[in-house]
C-alpha cells in the first residue's frame, strides 16, 4: 500500500498503472471486437459477446485490485443478495461521481455478470475505451436541451429508443444493466436548480427503467437497488487516484419488479406511466432516508472512536 506517499505522486503512479494495464488488456478485447464484427447475428455472436464481457470484467476487477493494493480505500459493502454470473439483473443507483462505476465493480466483483451502463454519445470518441464500450453494446445516449426539444419535438424519445435497443441486444446473455435514474451526477447546484424535494438526491427519471424492464422481459430476476455513500464527501477521479476516496459505504437491496411492469405502454398509457413513476418515487424516498441513516451511522462511529 502506497497511501503514505504524497497525493500527486500516488496519483501519478496509479494513473500509469491503470493506463498500462488498459493498453495490455485492450489487445484481447480488440481481437474479440473484430471477431464479433465478422460473426453473423445469432447464437454465435451472442457467444462472442459473452467472451468479450468476461474479458472486460477481468480488466475492470484487476483495476479494482490495483486500487485496493496501492490506495487502500476503506470499504463497507453490505450485499446479502444472492447473485449468479449467468443471470440478468437490472441495477439502479444514486450517482455522485465517475468513481461510482469503480465502486459498483468492487461491490459486485465476479459474483454477477459484467455491467452495461448508459453513456453520453460523445464518449464513443474516448481513445481505446470508446471502441470497447461500442463493442460491448453499451447504449450511447444523445442528450437534448429543453430548447432543442421545443424546436425539434421529433427528437423526443430518442434516448428511450436507445435504451430499448440496448436491452434487446443484451436479452440473450447474462448482464447487470445499470441505470443511474437521476440521469446526471449529483451536485448541490443541480439539486437547487431542480428544486428537488429529496435531501441527497436529484429527481429520478422513470422512463429508461420502464423501457429496460419491458425490453429485457420476465427473465429479469429483480431490481438491485444500490445506495452509495461517501462519508467524507464524493471526490473526482484524480482525487481518487491520489487516495482521497478514503471510505465508501455501499448497500444493495433486492426489490421485486411488479409483474404488470413487463407489459404496458409507458409513453401512451398515462395511468401506467403514473404507476411506474410512483414506484420509482417510493424507491427514491426510501433511498434518501437510507443515505441519511448511513451518514448518521458513520458519524456516530467516528465520534465513538
Image (cartoon, rainbow, N blue to C red):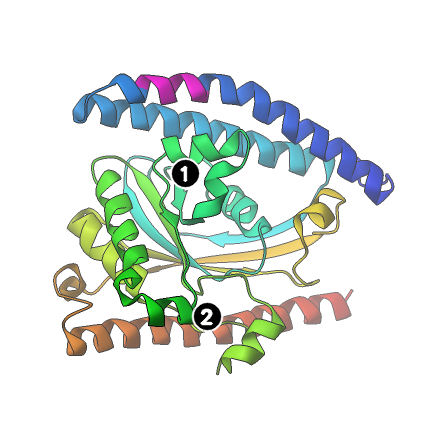
Residue displayed at 55% across by 48% down: 103
Counting other residues with Cα less than 10 Å from the Cα at mark 1, is it few (<14), some (14-19), or many (20 or more)? few
Instruction: Write down the residue under mark 2.
Output: 287
- N-term-proximal mark, 2 vs 1: 1
* Residue 99: x %, y % from top left: 59, 49
Residue 82 visible from this viewpoint: no
Q: Of helix, strand and loop, which mostly describes the magenta segment?
A: helix
Instruction: Write down the residue under mark 1.
Output: 111
Q: Quadrant of the N terminus?
A: top right
Residue displayed at 24% across by 27% down: 46
Residue 31 among those drawn in magenta: yes
Query: Which circle, 2 or 1, is nearer the viewer?
Result: 2
Residue displayed at 58% across by 26% down: 22
Q: CA distance from mark 2 to mark 1?
A: 24 Å
Residue 116 visible from this viewpoint: yes
Counting other residues with Cα less than 10 Å from the Cα at mark 2, is it few (<14), some (14-19), or many (20 or more)? many
Amino acid at each position: 500500500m502506497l497511501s503514505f506517499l504524497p497525493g500527486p505522486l500516488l496519483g501519478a503512479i496509479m494513473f500509469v498503472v491503470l493506463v498500462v494495464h488498459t493498453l495490455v488488456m485492450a489487445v484481447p478485447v480488440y481481437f474479440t471486437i473484430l471477431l464479433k464484427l465478422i460473426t453473423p447475428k445469432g447464437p454465435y455472436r451472442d457467444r462472442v459477446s459473452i467472451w468479450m464481457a468476461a474479458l472486460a470484467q477481468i480488466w475492470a476487477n484487476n483495476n479494482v485490485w490495483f486500487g485496493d493494493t496501492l490506495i487502500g480505500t476503506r470499504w463497507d459493502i453490505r450485499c446479502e443478495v444472492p447473485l449468479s454470473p449467468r443471470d440478468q439483473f437490472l441495477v439502479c443507483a444514486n450517482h455522485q461521481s465517475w468513481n461510482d462505476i469503480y465502486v459498483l465493480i468492487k461491490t459486485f466483483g465476479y459474483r454477477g455478470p459484467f455491467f452495461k451502463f448508459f453513456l453520453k454519445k460523445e464518449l464513443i470518441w474516448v481513445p481505446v475505451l470508446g471502441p470497447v464500450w461500442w463493442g460491448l453494446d453499451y447504449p450511447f445516449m444523445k442528450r437534448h436541451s429543453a430548447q432543442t426539444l421545443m424546436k425539434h419535438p421529433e427528437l423526443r424519445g430518442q434516448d428511450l429508443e436507445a435504451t430499448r435497443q440496448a436491452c434487446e441486444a443484451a436479452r440473450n446473455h447474462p448482464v447487470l444493466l445499470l441505470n443511474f435514474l437521476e440521469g446526471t451526477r449529483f451536485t448541490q447546484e443541480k439539486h437547487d436548480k431542480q428544486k428537488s424535494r429529496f435531501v441527497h438526491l436529484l429527481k429520478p427519471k422513470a422512463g429508461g427503467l420502464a423501457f429496460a424492464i419491458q425490453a429485457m422481459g420476465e427473465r429479469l430476476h429483480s431490481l438491485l437497488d444500490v445506495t452509495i455513500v461517501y462519508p467524507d464527501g464524493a471526490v473526482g477521479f484524480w482525487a481518487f487516484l491520489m487516495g482521497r476516496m478514503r471510505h465508501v459505504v455501499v448497500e444493495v437491496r433486492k426489490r421485486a419488479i411488479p409483474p404488470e411492469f413487463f407489459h404496458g405502454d409507458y409513453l401512451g398509457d398515462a395511468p401506467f406511466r403514473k404507476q411506474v413513476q410512483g414506484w420509482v418515487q417510493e424507491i427514491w424516498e426510501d433511498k434518501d432516508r437510507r443515505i441519511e441513516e448511513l451518514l448518521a451511522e458513520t458519524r456516530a462511529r467516528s465520534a465513538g472512536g
